Image: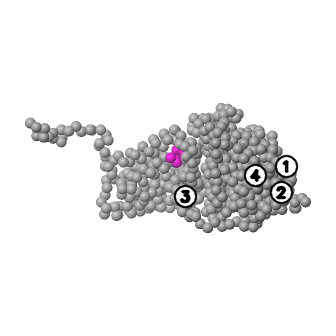
Amino acid sequence: MTPENLPLAAPSSLPVSHGWFTHRPTIGQTSLNLIVTAYILALLNSGFWRRAVEIFGESPAQLALFALAIAALTMLTLEFFGPARLQRPMAAVMIMMAAAAHYHERALGILVDREMVRNVLETTFTESRHLLTAGAMRAIVLTGVLPAALLFWPRLRQPSGWHQLWRWPLGVGLAFAVLVGSLFADFKTYSAVLRERGDLMASYQPGATIGALARYAKQQWKSGDGVVRPIGTDARPGPWLAGADKPVLLVLFAGETARAQNFGLNPGARQTTPELAARDVINFPDVSSCGTSTAVSLPCMFSPLTQAEYDRDDFLAQENLLDVLVRSGFDVRWIDNNTGDQTIARRIGWDRVDATLAPAACAGECTDEIFLPVIEQTLASITRNTVLVLHMIGNHGPAYHLRYPPERARFEPACDSAEFSRCTTEAIANAYDNALLETDFVLARTIDMLADSDRALTAMLYLSDHGESLGENGLYLHAAPMFMAPETQTKVPMVMWLDPEFRQDMGLDDDCLRTATTRPASHDNLFHTVLGLLDVATSARLPALDLAGGCRSTSPRS
């Protein structure tokens, strides 16, 4: 018998796998949405429920109705964004978003808002990889990626196209009705809670993340390349600046994540700034930041807008401090060792640090010591008035141990991991303070170079963009929404140093400047104080916000 004439086996005689995966259950769309809703609310919203119990704990009926409203809101989101074949992909995305947000809130106390989304989307790979620790990846995979993948295991009962025409609006409508009905059962109480406790809904996932993404997208859409309004069009050198017999050099350090509570020059802090303490600096112990993240604080610092006025759209729609300085004749350079200029220097351009200038400072990620050759080169070649803006990596976490060379560490034991769960609170604080010692080292060496130069009238100003939480009340890192941000994230160090020749030739009184340190200050002062120190005459400078205002002689010496 030839092979082609061999009898074929009956299909039933073929080996069949009876594994669990081949017996896929069939499930309806509504049932799947109910399962996803239950999973997200039960396992990925612990911070939300903790706050809800804190608020409604004395009234189980109010808590139950509010829980029903939140379940309806989650169902509404799933129904609205996931009709027909979009259902499982949308549900999978929601689970993974909720899992990522839940991990970072549970581990670091971080809540997701628009500026947190901006931080995530506009960061660098180097910065973001420190947050993607093994522990974070493990938690997100187990609670997010795997459950999202399991959504595609059951067979989904797909109704006909005609059935979908009434099923989708009905599902959306029913979920909306339950949501509204639950809230209106005690609307007075719920509206007051939602108005006064912004942290409650800010911790609800995935709603908070979806809302933050939508607000970020809306702002990006609105803030396209529009016409930029000029400011300080009358800017010109004042009489002291115009009469200086040497070029002026201001080195302006935009610090990163340094908090006032740990800055050694401030009362109550341990000595993290021994080098600055040995130099004739002017320290401002009570300074408030504009925001709690670089994306907000850095643009706000260089804007004429106050913290109460600041809005990103308004910032982008007008010029800033750098533009006014250029207009008044300064050579302005922005050198970055962080996440970029945040669009502040977009009209003048900016550069990243050149690792070849100090290879020892860039054995891993470049520490801020890399700025010292830049300052040295600037002093050696300066021929005109110059402002050098240096954006530091400073104390950027969670990898504080990468911000300083081991040989300059003083506080031990120090956390040598970006995964805080591996370290004690003391070790985390020690690593953070060692990073402050590195900032102290860089600022002190800068002062020494400026003081030794005879080619320019020199000055230095250091101001951090925001602070940092180091475990207080379960919070770590920064970027907490301002309405709930602790002072550890909003109080920042600020230090000024003026060479005696600079003070004399620019007509500034040292005692008067030191008196200004007894009053509260903020990021609102930077724009106006820089213009005041440099004697830039312009109507854009508000004397009330100039910390050097009133400290200059009325007319230059003859």
Question: In front: mark 1 or mark 3?
Answer: 1
Question: How far is the residue under mark 2 from the one under mark 3?
Answer: 47 Å
Considering only order in the chain, which callout, 3 or 1, is on the residue closer to the N terminus?
3
Can you identify the residue that label 4 sits on?
382
- What is the spatial separation of the Cα atoms under label 4 and label 2, in whole angstroms? 14 Å
Q: Disc 3 residue type?
A: Tyr
Q: Are marks 2 and 3 in contact (CB under 8 Å)?
A: no
Q: Determine which quarter of the picture holds residue 237.
A: bottom right
Indicate which disc, 3 or 4, sits on the residue closer to the N terminus.
Answer: 3
Indicate whether residue 103 is drawn in magenta: yes
| SS of the residue under disc 4 | loop
Q: Which residues are magenta?
A: 100-104
Q: Which residue is mark 1?
A: 500
Q: Which mark is residue 284?
A: none
Label 2: how many Cα within 10 Å (few below 14, some 14–19, many 20+): some
Q: Please report contact status of discs 4 and 1: CB closer than 8 Å, yes or no.
A: no
**Corner quadrant of residue 242:** bottom right
Image location (x, y in percent) of residue 545: 76, 59
Rendered position, 12 above or below 72: above
Report the residue at 74% width, 50% height from top: 381
Q: Which residue was labeled with disc 2?
A: 244
Q: Between disc 2 and disc 3, whose residue precedes? A: 3
Left or right: 317, with 13 as reference point: right
Of badges 4 and 2, the one in the foreground is: 4
The circle drawn on residue 216 is 3
Give the residue displayed 42% in from the left and 52% down from the top. Answer: 91
Which one is nearer the viewer's eye here, 2 or 180?
2
Q: Which one is in front, 196 or 138?
A: 138
Placement of 319 over or under 143, stated as above or below: below
18 part of magenta stretch: no
- The kind of residue tagged 2 is Ala
Q: CA distance from mark 1 to mark 3?
A: 47 Å
